[in-house]
């Protein structure tokens, strides 16, 4: 075999290898799962989610006139502590921060904390006006006045 024929065969071999590699890549790429698009989260919801620790599993339903913010705390004891009611203030502090950054707090706000023990669940719920949260966040009313405005309820279940 002449040198020129050998060179041509090597070139064809390389082109063949390139074509097979390209087809292999196309097949591999076609079999990769399409990544799911990340849901767009409104900036105000994202701010609240950043202000609340992730282990509390915040759930936020924000509508024009209503806002519901729920937290779940899991305790490795039979009955969760009564102090879990303080987690409502975690929610209120996050809402106050959102209000100070320009987020329009809806007129009605519902807060829920579910404190789960191994045998007992304690649920704290609070309803408050968005106006009260905005006034407290801006410093127009003290925390005590905000506390008096909150309609609070607690339920224990076995």
Image (cartoon, grey):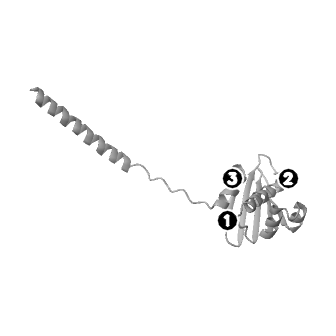
The first of marks 3 and 1 along the sequence is 3
Q: Name the residue under label 2.
A: 83
Which badge, 3 or 2, is on the more N-terminal residue? 3
Q: In this view, does 16 lie above or below 86?
A: above
- Can residue 158 be seen here? The reply is no
Q: In which quarter of the image is the N terminus?
A: top left
User: Residue 126 location in percent, x, y?
Assistant: 80, 65
* Alpha-carbon span between mark 2 and mark 1: 25 Å
Tag 3–tag 2 contact (CB < 8 Å): no
Image x and y of residue 22, in percent: 30, 43
- 3 or 2: mark nearer the eye: 3
Judged from this view, the residue extending furthest toward the left is 1
Whether tag 3 and tag 1 are in contact, CB under 8 A, the answer is: no
Circle 2 or circle 1, nearest the eye: 1
Residue 61 coordinates in the image, percent (x, y) = 67, 65
14 relative to 1 in the view: left or right: right
Answer few, some or many: residues within 10 Å of disc 1's Cα (few below 14, many 20 plus, some between 14 and 19).
few
| Residue 13 quadrant | top left
What residue lies at 73% left-to-right and 55% top-to-bottom?
72
Residue 151, position as x, y percentages in the image: 84, 68
Between the C-alphas of marks 3 and 1, the distance is 16 Å
Q: Which residue is drawn at 87% across and 63% down?
A: 147
Q: Mark 3, residues whose alpha carbon is within 10 Å: few (<14), some, or many (≥20)?
A: few
Q: Quadrant of residue 136?
A: bottom right
Which of the marked residues, 2 or 1, is nearer the chain's N terminus? Answer: 1
> Element type at marker 3?
helix
- Which image quarter is the C terminus in? bottom right
- Mark 2 crowd level (few <14, some 14–19, many ≥20, 10 Å Cα): few
Q: Name the residue under label 3.
A: 50
Q: In which quarter of the image is residue 123?
A: bottom right
In the rendered image, which residue does mark 1 sit on? Answer: 61
Which is nearer the eye, 70 or 81?
70
């Amino acid at each position: 075999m002449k040198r020129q024929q050998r060179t041509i065969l090597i070139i064809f071999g390389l082109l063949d290898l390139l074509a097979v590699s390209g087809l292999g890549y196309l097949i591999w790429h076609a079999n990769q799962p399409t990544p799911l698009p990340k849901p767009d989260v409104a900036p105000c919801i994202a701010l609240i989610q950043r202000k609340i620790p992730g282990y509390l599993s915040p759930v936020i339903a924000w509508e024009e006139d209503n806002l519901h913010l729920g937290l779940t705390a899991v305790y490795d004891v039979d009955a969760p502590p009564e102090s879990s009611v303080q987690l409502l203030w975690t929610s209120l502090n996050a809402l106050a921060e959102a209000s100070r950054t320009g987020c329009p707090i809806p007129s009605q706000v519902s807060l829920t904390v579910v404190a789960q023990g191994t045998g007992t669940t304690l649920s704290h719920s609070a309803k408050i006006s968005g106006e009260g949260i905005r006034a407290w966040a801006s410093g127009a009313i003290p925390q005590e006045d905000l506390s008096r405005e909150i309609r609070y309820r607690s339920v224990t279940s076995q």
